[in-house]
Every structure is written in structure tokens, then in C-alpha cells.
Image (cartoon, rainbow, N blue to C red):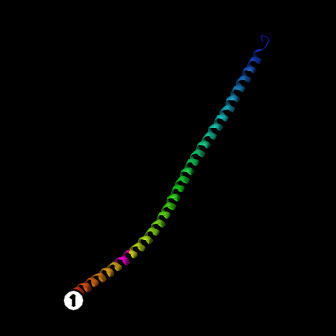
């Protein structure tokens, strides 16, 4: 190594500096590329979360609408049953009134019968 001239040392030093500079440049580009990839992944993550939130909201709305429609149908059936029960109740009240009226007539006739034969 003692036989080498100062220009060789300078050339070797320049090569090392060049290698170091090129390495820094390459690693800097890779780092920027990784940062860009990371930012893209974050954007995709945000997009996916928004889509999944919208999908879950949409699912919730659809399930609530479906359940609401089922309840409306059940209420319609219950209402129809209630109307039928009310009609039956009305008919039973009319029959009860008729029976009560006829019972009063029979009671009146029985009173007249016993009054006539007493």
C-alpha cells in the first residue's frame, strides 16, 4: 500500500464517495417508494373502512325495513282478528239481548199464569 500514489488514493476515495452517494440515492428512492406504498395502503384501508361502514349501515337499514314490514303484516293480521272478534262480540250481545228479552217475556207470562190460577 505504500507504493500507491496519491492519485490512486483519491480515485479510491472518489469511488467510495460515489458508491456511498449512489447507495444513499437508491435507498432514498426505495424509502420514498415504501412511503408511497404505505400511503396507498392507508388510503385503501380508509376506503375499505368507509365501504364496510356503508355496507353495514345498508344492511342495518335493510334488516330494519324487513323487520318493520314483518311487524306491519303481523299488525294487519291482528287487526283482522280483532275486527272478527268484535263482530262476534256484537253478535253475542245481540243474542244475549234477545235471550234476555225472551226470558223477560216468559217471566211475564209465568207471572200472568200464576196470577190467573191463584
Residue 84 part of the magenta-drawn span: no
Q: Give the image location of residue 114, x and y in percent.
A: 23, 85
The magenta region covers 89-93
Query: Which of the 4 image quarters holds residue 31?
Result: top right
Q: Give the image location of residue 88, x and y in percent.
A: 40, 75
Q: Secondary structure at mark 1?
A: helix
Which residue is labeled 1 in the image? 116
Position of residue 81 relative to residue 113, above or below, is above
Q: Residues within 10 Å of mark 1 (few under 14, many from 20)?
A: few
**Dominant secondary structure (helix, strand or loop) of the stretch shown in magenta:** helix
Position of residue 57 relative to residue 101, above or below, is above
Q: How many marks?
A: 1
Query: Which of the 4 image quarters holds residue 81?
Result: bottom left
Q: Give the image location of residue 37, x and y in percent.
A: 64, 40
Q: Residue at x 75, y 15 (%)?
A: 6
Q: Residue at x 67, y 31 (%)?
A: 27
Q: Residue at x 77, y 18 (%)?
A: 8
Position of residue 111 relative to residue 60, above or below, is below
Query: Which of the 4 image quarters holds residue 94?
Result: bottom left
Front position in the image: 88 or 34: 88
Residue 92 part of the magenta-drawn span: yes
Q: Give the image location of residue 40, x and y in percent.
A: 62, 43
Amino acid at each position: 500500500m505504500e507504493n500507491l500514489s496519491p492519485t490512486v488514493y483519491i480515485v479510491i476515495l472518489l469511488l467510495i464517495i460515489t458508491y456511498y452517494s449512489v447507495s444513499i440515492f437508491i435507498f432514498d428512492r426505495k424509502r420514498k417508494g415504501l412511503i408511497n406504498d404505505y400511503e396507498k395502503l392507508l388510503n385503501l384501508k380508509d376506503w375499505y373502512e368507509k365501504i364496510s361502514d356503508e355496507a353495514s349501515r345498508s344492511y342495518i337499514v335493510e334488516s330494519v325495513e324487513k323487520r318493520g314490514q314483518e311487524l306491519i303484516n303481523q299488525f294487519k293480521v291482528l287487526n283482522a282478528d280483532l275486527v272478527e272478534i268484535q263482530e262476534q262480540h256484537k253478535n253475542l250481545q245481540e243474542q244475549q239481548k234477545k235471550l234476555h228479552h225472551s226470558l223477560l217475556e216468559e217471566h211475564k207470562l209465568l207471572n200472568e199464569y200464576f196470577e190467573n190460577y191463584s
